[in-house]
Image (cartoon, rainbow, N blue to C red):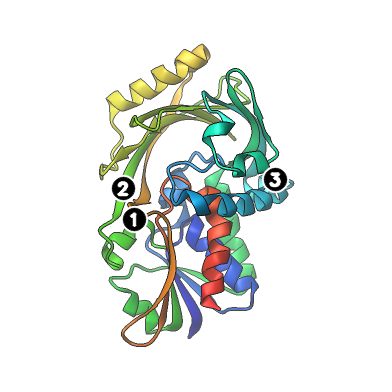
Amino acid sequence: MADVVVVGGGVSGLTTALVLAERGRRVRVWSREPAGETTSAVAGALWWPYRIEPLDRVGDWALTTLRRYEELAAYPEETGVRLVDGLHRGERLAGLGSWARESAQVVETAEGLRCRLPLIDMPVHLAWLEERVRAAGGTVERRAVASFDEAAAEAGTVVDCAGLGARELVPDAGVRPVRGQLVLVENPGIREWFTEADPASSETTYFFPQPGRLVLGGTAAADDWSAVPDPRTAEDIVARCARVRPEIARARVLGHRVGLRPARDAGVRIEAETLSGGARLIHNYGHGGAGVTVALGCALEAAELVG
């Protein structure tokens, strides 16, 4: 028997499991797929509150997580976290919450916001999280569930970090996919990241220099369940990025990725309820496009509900 079963092995599930395990809880993580095949593994992944609600709570979660990433950036090869300079073109501090000023790494310029922010190599970071969970006495298991009652049969507390899976497991019809498509290319020497986003559009432009590759994006198509890369969309992504840095047009394509961001109409849900059999169920889902950005902040709040 475990004290807690965490359902979901992406960045939210593993971070929550780690917090609980380090507090002495006997934790089991149940994940349908390996961490490297979760939506989290596809993420870009730049620290920034993107497409996430509620705005009045996101700032605190994000800043808590930022401080941890700043510490982990001292060991980039191990943790996958680096601090990298870049530009949010067109962004203004006046349009953001107080968290932007408190991050202390953001400077407003004529072009937009120049920032030095955590950029996370997600496959490396997820592997590091799994290793830390095991080192703290937890287990990570490949196991799909049809209901939370299955987990409750083996632990007194269940934590729901199921992401998009919460739509059926809870069930919560407000959970919806926001499809993101990426193109991976050989890096032609770009060292800084770049983003330009229009909240009213399903198209964004960004590139993130990750070890061994340059990640190009992107899209944000709500209610699109397709996990298959679209060739025309890929061409458009490369073309948009090349308008910013022309050398990208000549970069050799290494691969294509699609991730379905787990958005929720009412925003992130972190709350407790009691299952019919008496076990406690703690929800931690609905992180949209910012699961990486708020992972620790949300994990700590969920862990407080576990008690």
Q: CA distance from mark 3 to mark 2?
A: 30 Å
Mark before the other along the chain sequence, 1 or 3? 3
Q: Residue at x 39, y 33 (%)?
A: 199
Q: Is residue 278 above or below residue 244?
A: below
Label 3 or label 2, whichever lies nearer to me, is 2
Q: CA distance from mark 1 to mark 2?
A: 7 Å
Asked whether the residues under the numbered discs 1 and 2 touch, taking CB atoms below 8 Å apart as contact, a structural biologist would say: yes
Q: Is residue 220 above or below residue 62?
A: above
How dense is the environment of label 1, judged by Cα within 10 Å: few (below 14), some, or many (20 and up)? many
Q: Quadrant of the C terminus?
A: bottom right
Q: Is residue 166 above or below residue 96?
A: below
Q: Residue at x 61, y 44 (%)?
A: 99
Mark before the other along the chain sequence, 1 or 2? 1
Is there any visible trace of residue 126 in the rendered image?
A: no
Residue 291 x, y percent position in the rendering: 48, 51
How dense is the environment of label 3, judged by Cα within 10 Å: few (below 14), some, or many (20 and up)? some
Q: Secondary structure at mark 2?
A: strand
Residue on which disc 3 sits: 73
Nearest the camera: 182 or 95?
Answer: 95
Which corner quadrant of the image does residue 301 belong to?
Answer: bottom right
Q: Secondary structure at mark 3?
A: loop
How dense is the environment of label 2, judged by Cα within 10 Å: few (below 14), some, or many (20 and up)? many
Q: Is residue 194 above or below residue 211?
A: above
Residue on which disc 2 sits: 177
Which corner quadrant of the image does residue 297 belong to?
Answer: bottom right
Is there any visible trace of residue 86 in the rendered image?
A: yes
Mark before the other along the chain sequence, 3 or 2? 3
Q: Secondary structure at mark 1?
A: helix
Query: Residue 164 has which mark?
Result: 1
Residue type (three-letter) at the residue carrying disc 1: Leu
Which corner quadrant of the image does residue 180 belong to?
Answer: top left
Q: CA distance from mark 1 to mark 3?
A: 29 Å
